[in-house]
Image (tube, rainbow, N blue to C red):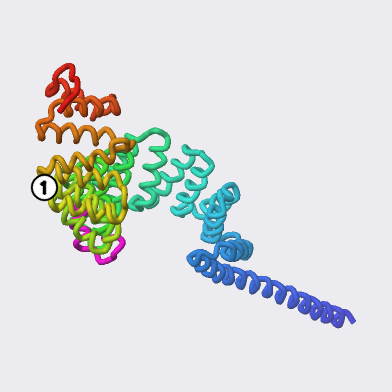
Amino acid sequence: MLRKAISAGIIILCAVSGCESQSEGKKLAQTQWQKASAYAKLNLAEQQYQNEQLEEALKTASECVSANPDMPEAHLLFGRLLLAQRQLHKAANELTRAVKLDEKLDSGWYWLGVAAEGEGNYQQAQAHYEKAMSLKSENVDYILATAEILSAQDRKDDAIRLLEAKVAEMPKEISLKVAAADFMWQMGKDQQAIELYKQAMLMADDDYNREIAESLGYCYVFSGEWDEAAKIFTELSERCTQQQRKKLYLQVAALCGMNCGGYGTAINCYNQLSVTERDNPQVWLKLGQAALGVGAADRAFECGRKALSLQGGSAEAIALVGCAQYVGGDYAAAVTNFEKIATDDKYGSFSWLMRARCYERLGKKGKASLAYQKALEMNPHSELGRFLTQEIHKKAPPVIKGGN
């Protein structure tokens, strides 16, 4: 009986043990399945994020975190998605979990910096960016983020020193040179920006080179180096096959040419623009003004007439025609045209000035003096007013009554 009882007990014990072992096996299998599922969900969430399916990605990432709460990459992606939804506090919590699980997760520290910056905590953001940069020192995003947060704290000199040091450490890193140049330009350090853009251009391939050249060109524009800017945009226009972009390059090159006295460049650009913009009065006006710059009075006259045919009554077009007649020596005709815009808000004072000059050429000194006085009365405090004051004192008698 005792042996039977012991045997029965052993059988029962084995049966219970088998049930427990089977239960543990199921739990282990379930855990392994959840982890495998989490990695699959992570890949799906990443793909949804890349496809800008943010709501779906957020849901999938949440499921991923639930399936495997010990996976730092899942918390990282979930945090980034929450950041995209401007849920900064929740995002920071997820990102903090990510870096606690993996302290060497450089992108986790970077995105924590983004979250802190979004909440206006610049010092904390700086600490996170610097941590990310310490883990991956060559990452341009981390370097630039650190420089920008230093600048936001009014530590622009520190930001510039950081960028200069990193450029020196990585002289072959084109993207860093360009990023540093962009930053220098924003800080008003035009010459440093120009030098970095030029270095980057020498190292870049054709597609990237175009982008860098464009930035360099605009940097020249804003620093007032019109001649250099004109060269850059002229070259860009010659190499460009995309019509709208080519049009922009031509317009900027022409503007730069006008500003530096490079009227030949401007004429060439406006000539090209007139092919596709033949019904645009502004193109003909600018072409005419450039023609005046090289003394081509007949060309300027025709351009002015063309602009008038497209925009009848345009004071600017009438002024161009009058100036072309003045340069061409037809002073009487020029006076007639300038009279048409004598009351125009923008060109009225200019009209009287040019009539004064025409009268001088025609030998009508009395009328010239009166016209100078009238021009000054209309615009006494401008640069033109100061010029007119000099003209009156230089050329006209002190008191004029009547005139021929």
Magenta stretch: dominant SS? helix
Q: Quadrant of the C terminus?
A: top left
| Residue 231 visible to the viewer | no
| Quadrant assignment, res 68 | bottom right
Rendered location of residue 234, percent (x, y):
19, 55
Residue at x-position 30% and y-position 47%: 314
Rendered location of residue 2, percent (x, y):
88, 79
Depicted 288 relative to depicted 242: above or below: above
Depicted 105 relative to depicted 29: above or below: above
- Furthest residue toward top: 398
Residue at x-position 25% and y-position 27%: 374
What residue does disc 1 label?
294
In this image, 257 relative to 85: left or right? left
In this image, 54 relative to 170: left or right? right
In the image shown, does 37 or 252 lie closer to the viewer? 252
Rendered location of residue 219, percent (x, y):
26, 45
Secondary structure of residue under mark 1: loop
Q: Quadrant of the N terminus?
A: bottom right
**Magenta highlight on residue 263:** no
Depicted 81 relative to depicted 377: above or below: below
Residue at x-position 26% and y-position 53%: 307
Looking at the rendered structure, the kind of residue marked 1 is Val
- Furthest residue toward right: 1
Q: How many marks?
A: 1
The span shown in magenta is 231-246
In the image shown, does 207 or 233 lie closer to the viewer? 233
Q: Residues within 10 Å of mark 1 (few under 14, many from 20)?
A: some
In this image, 206 relative to 13: left or right? left
| Residue 141 visible to the viewer | yes
| Quadrant assignment, res 240 | bottom left
Rendered location of residue 277, percent (x, y):
28, 60
